[in-house]
Image (spheres, helix red, strand yellow):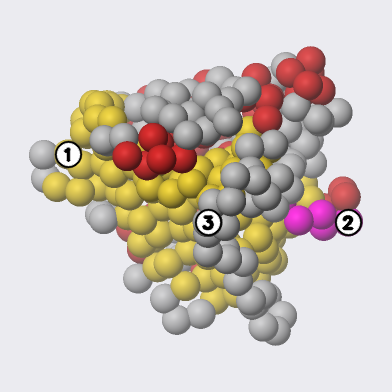
Amino acid sequence: MPIDAAKALAAGPRTGEISWTRKDVLLYHLGIGAGRPATDPAELRYTLESRLHVLPSFATVAGGGPPGVISGLSMPGVDVDLARVLHAGQSLALHRTLPAEGTATTSERIVAVHDKGTAAVLVLRTDAADADGPLWTAHARIHVRGEGGWGGDRGPATRREPPAGAPDRTVERPVREDQALLYRLCGDWNPLHADPEFAARAGFDRPVLHGLCTYGITLKAVVDTLLDGDVTRVRGCTARFAGVVHPGETLRVRMWRGAGEIRMDVGAVERGDAPVLADAGVRYA
């Protein structure tokens, strides 16, 4: 079996150093659709370096290195074909507000390997800290088709009860046809999001949008509509990637506001609100 669960779990953490500038943050914000309308003061917080606010989901691409999925496939005990891999979910805990420029030390390790029968799910934990202390902790869930069935632990249930009642807010966010091509410049070079031939080998009729791009679009929608545009109020964000987004589609984001958490549900409008993000929530102060 290409995934050696015991070896992956026993491996020590892989450490490294990352750095980023305002230019990286600006590119990320453009990659998730910020800047429309271009002169809107609310959008200039994301697109003008002199008043820059960093959306917390920038942590998922900070440093421009391999994203969680590709990074996880290079860990000890993991040797699989990228075409059989999907990003299944992402959680992010913020320890403090992200600076617009910085350098941080990262530590990555596989903290769980779940046997789902027809697939395996790897959980990659990443911690980042700078000279002032911890910045963020992220967990990426990596779904590998055809790697289950060895009799291992199935792992905890990740699905939550849906929010009750009508949403407090519903917004729609159009996705540009070239959104994936722009977003991949942040460091996620997985050909699934750009190369039609690779997408076909992975079982898709065309390239699809990065799950983390949808994640960022959704977090921005929550911040802009229910958190008064204040990125410093975000304490964490989690989501299960329930389906794909095709560049050029429209996302419908439903939001339910509770005490300390906003729940979200995201669907693709043109496909009858086909699920895109599920079990999603933003913790806030």
Pointer 1 and pointer 2: residues touching (CB < 8 Å)? no
Tag 1: residue type?
A: Asp
Residue in the image at 39% along x and 28% along y: 76
Residue topped by disc 1: 130
Horizontal side of 266 relative to 64 (left or right) equals: right
Determine the CA span between mark 2 and mark 3.
35 Å
Determine the CA span between mark 1 and mark 2.
44 Å
Residue topped by disc 2: 272
Q: Quadrant of residue 106?
A: top left
Q: Position of residue 163 (x, y in %)?
A: 64, 77
Does the segment drawn in magenta span residue 273? yes
Does the segment drawn in magenta span residue 42? no
Q: Quadrant of residue 253?
A: bottom right
Dominant secondary structure of the magenta stretch?
Answer: strand
Q: Earlier in the sequence, mark 3 or mark 1?
A: 1
Split into 4 quadrants, where in the image is the N terminus?
top right
Residue topped by disc 3: 153
Q: Earlier in the sequence, mark 2 or mark 3?
A: 3
